[in-house]
Image: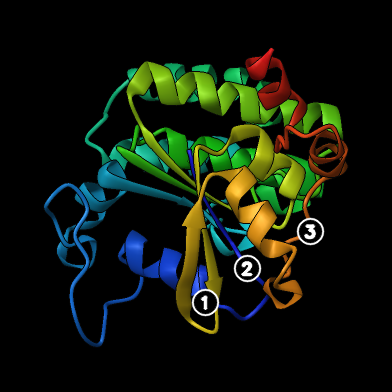
Amino acid sequence: MVSVVGPNGSGKSTLMYLMAGIYSPTSGSIEIAGKPPASLSGGERIRLVGYVFQNPDQMFLNTTVRAEIEMTLKLTGVRGRVLGRLAQEIAKELGIDKLLDKSPHKLSVGQRRLASLAAVLAARPKVLILDEPTRGLDRETAENVMRYLMDLKREREMTVVLVSHDMRQVGDYSQLVYVMYDGRVIFRGTPEEVFAEAEKHKEWGVDPPQVYYATKALGKPAASLRRVKAYV
């Protein structure tokens, strides 16, 4: 998984909008799998790039969670009785199958986030962009969602791009991290490399997790407990 980090206003969300085809570049070009996202039809675009917004309320257009998921499926060409079955399966995987007939706008913050994720995953995108995907979720649910997404990434051979201020999450799941500042990518590296450099640049807004400092004191800095175990 690739993560994009940096302070508020650094351009992270704008970059994601460009990658998802929501914005068109004013100069240069953007291609994903050889295709410019902004020039694709709605159905083609959501199969190529799925974008889970930081604010899920920006995504909801229907009166029920079921209708949100089925709308995505219809855009990908699914029709008939299979619609309901697939919507049920996707919702069940995320633990929201009992919420299918509820209004997404009346759910809790965490439930709305899961509903928006289900609607995006229904298209089986090649690239999945997650903008603060676990904000509003308790730690256990957040961990379960991230493990589910990593399993799905391996199963579908999907590229996952994470935008997050949660450095514990970044350290746990990222292979590569890009740092943005003032509209530009100014550094990239492994989580450990980024955390080490961030100590010299407080303006980046990157606050390494405690495990990084603890393992650094022992002479082998690691970005997460999971990565500590990988060294043993």
- Cα separation between marks 1 and 2: 8 Å
Between 163 and 61, the one nearer to me in the picture: 163
- Disc 3 marks a residue whose amino acid type is Asp
| Label of residue 6 in the image | 2
Establish if 171 lies above or below 130: above
* Disc 3 to disc 1, C-alpha distance: 18 Å
Would you name the residue on which mark 3 appears? 207
* Image location (x, y in percent) of residue 214: 88, 37
Nearest to the eye among marks 3 and 1: give it. Answer: 3
Q: Residues within 10 Å of mark 1 (few under 14, many from 20)?
A: some
- The answer to which quarter of the image holds residue 40 is bottom left
Query: What residue is at 25 percent from the left and 56 percent from the top?
Result: 42
Which residue reaches farthest top?
Answer: 232
In x, y percent, where is residue 9?
62, 81
| Element at label 2 | loop
State the residue at coordinates (44%, 64%).
Answer: 16
Estimate the x, y position of residue 188 in percent, counting from the top left.
48, 57
| Eye-nearest disc, 1 or 2 | 2
Identify the amino acid type marked 2. Gly
Number of callouts: 3
Residue type at mark 1 is Gly
Callout 2–callout 3 Cβ contact below 8 Å: no
Residue designated by label 1: 11
Spatial CA distance of label 2 from label 3 is 10 Å
Q: Residues within 10 Å of mark 3 (few under 14, many from 20)?
A: some
Task: Please identify the quarter of the rendering in which residue 202 is found.
Answer: bottom right
188 is higher (above) or lower (below) than 220: below
The answer to which of marks 2 and 3 sits earlier in the sequence is 2
Residue 4 in sight from this viewpoint? yes
Direction front: furthest residue? 219
Q: How is the image coloured?
A: rainbow
Front residue of this view, candidates 76 and 136: 136
